[in-house]
Structure formats: structure tokens, C-alpha cells
């Protein structure tokens, strides 16, 4: 059983039209579109936060390395 062919798509479209009506379908499509857009924005923000936190982590590690590399200057008499 594969993807539906042309006649099956027509039948599916007719059933959806009967169930929801002509006026409700554009509203459903708009809601679906905005939901997908919000999901993509959330994924993008999550990636940006992950990159920012990785950059901060690297910066902290570099600071820690430079502090440990500084020699202690003590004078012995």
C-alpha cells in the first residue's frame, strides 16, 4: 500500500469538504500554517540559545586556562 493516487486524493478532498464545509477549511489551513511557523521559530530560537550557551562555555574555559597559565611571582629572600 503506497501513496494515494489521483482518484483517492479527490475522494479525500470531498470527504474533508463534507466534514468541515467550505468556510472552515481556510481557517483550518491558516491555523495549521501559523502552528508550523511557530514551531519553526521555536526550533530556531532553541538552536540560537544552544550556540550562545556553547560560546559562553568556551569563553569561560579560555579564561580559566589563562588564569592557570599565569605564573605565581613570589620573591624569596
Image: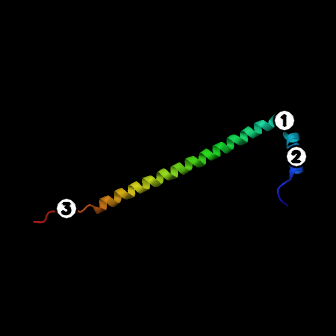
Residue at point 86%, 48% (across, down):
9
Q: Are marks 1 and 2 in contact (CB under 8 Å)?
A: no
Residue 22 numbered tag: 1
Q: Are marks 3 and 1 in contact (CB under 8 Å)?
A: no
* Quadrant position of residue 2: bottom right
N-terminal-most mark, 3 or 1 = 1
Residue at point 76%, 39% (across, down):
28
Q: Is residue 30 left or right of residue 4?
A: left
Residue placed under numbered mark 3 in the picture: 73
Q: Position of residue 14 (x, y in %)?
A: 88, 43
Quadrant, the C terminus: bottom left
Residue at point 89%, 49% (across, down):
7
Residue 10 numbered tag: 2
N-terminal-most mark, 1 or 2 = 2
Mark 3 crowd level (few <14, some 14–19, many ≥20, 10 Å Cα): few
**Label 3 SS:** loop
**Label 2 SS:** helix
**Label 1 SS:** loop
Front disc: 3 or 1: 1
Front disc: 2 or 3: 2
Q: Nearer the viewer, residue 16 or 3?
A: 3
Quadrant, the N terminus: bottom right
Gap in Å between the C-alphas at discs 1 and 2? 15 Å
Mark 2 crowd level (few <14, some 14–19, many ≥20, 10 Å Cα): few
Gap in Å between the C-alphas at discs 2 and 3? 83 Å
Gap in Å between the C-alphas at discs 3 and 1? 82 Å
Q: Nearer the viewer, residue 13 or 38?
A: 13
Q: Position of residue 67 (x, y in %)?
A: 30, 59
Residue at point 64%, 46% (across, down):
39
Amino acid at each position: 500500500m503506497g501513496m494515494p493516487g489521483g482518484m483517492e486524493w479527490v475522494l479525500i478532498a470531498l470527504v474533508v469538504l463534507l466534514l468541515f464545509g467550505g468556510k472552515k477549511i481556510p481557517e483550518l489551513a491558516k491555523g495549521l500554517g501559523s502552528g508550523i511557523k511557530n514551531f519553526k521559530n521555536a526550533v530556531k530560537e532553541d538552536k540560537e540559545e544552544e550556540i550562545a550557551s556553547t560560546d559562553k562555555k568556551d569563553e569561560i574555559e579560555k579564561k580559566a586556562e589563562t588564569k592557570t597559565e599565569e605564573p605565581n611571582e613570589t620573591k624569596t629572600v
